[in-house]
Image (tube, rainbow, N blue to C red):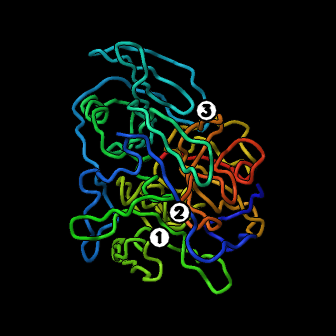
Amino acid sequence: MTETPSPDDVSSATTAPGPGRRPRALVATAGLLVGALCLAAGSAAAAGPVEKASGSRTSGKTTSSTTATATSTTTTSTTSTTSTTSSGWTYKQLSAPARVQVLDGSTQPVATFTVGARTVTLRGAARTFAEPTTTSATVVSRTWVRLLPKPFTGTVDTVWLSSALADTSPDVLAVATQYVTGAATVRDTAGSLVSSDADYGPLQADGTREEGSDFNDYLGIPWAYGAQTDAPEARQIGALDCSGFIRMVLGRRAGLPLTLDPDGGLGLPRRSFEMLDSAPGVVTVPNTGTRPASTAGLAPGDLVFFDGSADDGARIDHVGLYLGTDTAGAPRFVSSRKTINGPTLGDTGGRSTLSGTGYYANAWRAARRP
């Protein structure tokens, strides 16, 4: 398969997609939540005339205590530094980046919290993420990803943890698949669009896809950033470019604060290179200007960043969401691309993997844990 670039933030894809929508299909195992129609409380509600872009939709209690961790770094390691047991849970402190791993009574890991990040990986029911029209590989995973109400500081809230482990509503990974190939159209009780088989952007006269489709363009609603309001582009309704897709999943749906411009890491900014430089969370794989030597430090839910264009120097120009290891043993991600006209975890126009010799594997540069 010939792989062609499709960076989001620059108009430099070397192969233009044909007109119309791409062929799409999505398969989910029975009883699982991949592409489920049920939505987390509040996430399906339609926006009012103007919605505020700051704050979080996620709530949680902070009534319990367990353990503290060291300062986080950007080098990956799984070395355990300390281990304590309390109330049936065992807590292991891990370093680089600083994390707390929670184990149950059978010594099985049930959750991992990263200092400075809001995303938490949790053990849950196995799910299969698949896109059979674009790849034979699938991702079968028991890892679920949910967001804390605020960045983790080293103390595990066991009330939140117990609730999160029991939660069966769509998590970050499942929400991401609600916009990919073949996803069903979901509307709220008012008839407003929530999720669907999304495009990348409108088809232009030269056969390329227009960039700039943010989450509020997809929904057709204005969005307020303080005193500034971003009005939707009518021609971009139902479309998400790569950073717009991430902002939909982690911002609009999961509750990370959003910003148009970098604000020192408080909000999720608009452009992919800005997300690496200034966004909530911690950098787990730093950008050295070359392909990272290993994917061992990645966790499902991490943002992965790419330098896919030759005409903007070494600037990051594409972003995706890491899903996990696929059935072929490759680390697989999902992102929105021009070449297939929308979000995909498949291999059309470039394999969605970080290993091997494919286009995106060679273009991969860094990772951030939101």
Whether the residues at callouts 1 and 2 have beta carbons within 8 Å, the answer is: yes
Task: Give the residue at mark 2.
Answer: 243
Task: Give the residue at mark 3.
Answer: 76
Quick one: label 1, few (<14), some, or many (20+) residues within 10 Å?
Answer: many
Amino acid type, mark 3? Thr
Relative vertical location of residue 345 with respect to residue 338 in this rendering, above or below = above
Is 260 left or right of 209, judged from the image as shown?
left
Question: Distance from label 1 to label 3 (Cα)?
Answer: 32 Å
Disc nearest the viewer among 1 and 3: 1
Regarding mark 3 in the picture, which secondary structure is present there? loop
Relative vertical location of residue 235 with respect to residue 94 in this rendering, above or below = below
Residue 218 screen position, x and y as percent: 42, 71
Regarding mark 1 in the picture, which secondary structure is present there? loop
Q: In percent of the image, x 42 and y 18: which residue is there?
A: 108
Task: Give the residue at mark 1.
Answer: 214
**Nearer-N-terminus badge (1/3):** 3
Is 334 left or right of 223, judged from the image as shown?
right
Amino acid type, mark 1? Asp
**Nearer-N-terminus badge (2/3):** 3
Amino acid type, mark 2? Ser
Residue farthest bottom in this picture: 205
Is 121 left or right of 243, judged from the image as shown?
left
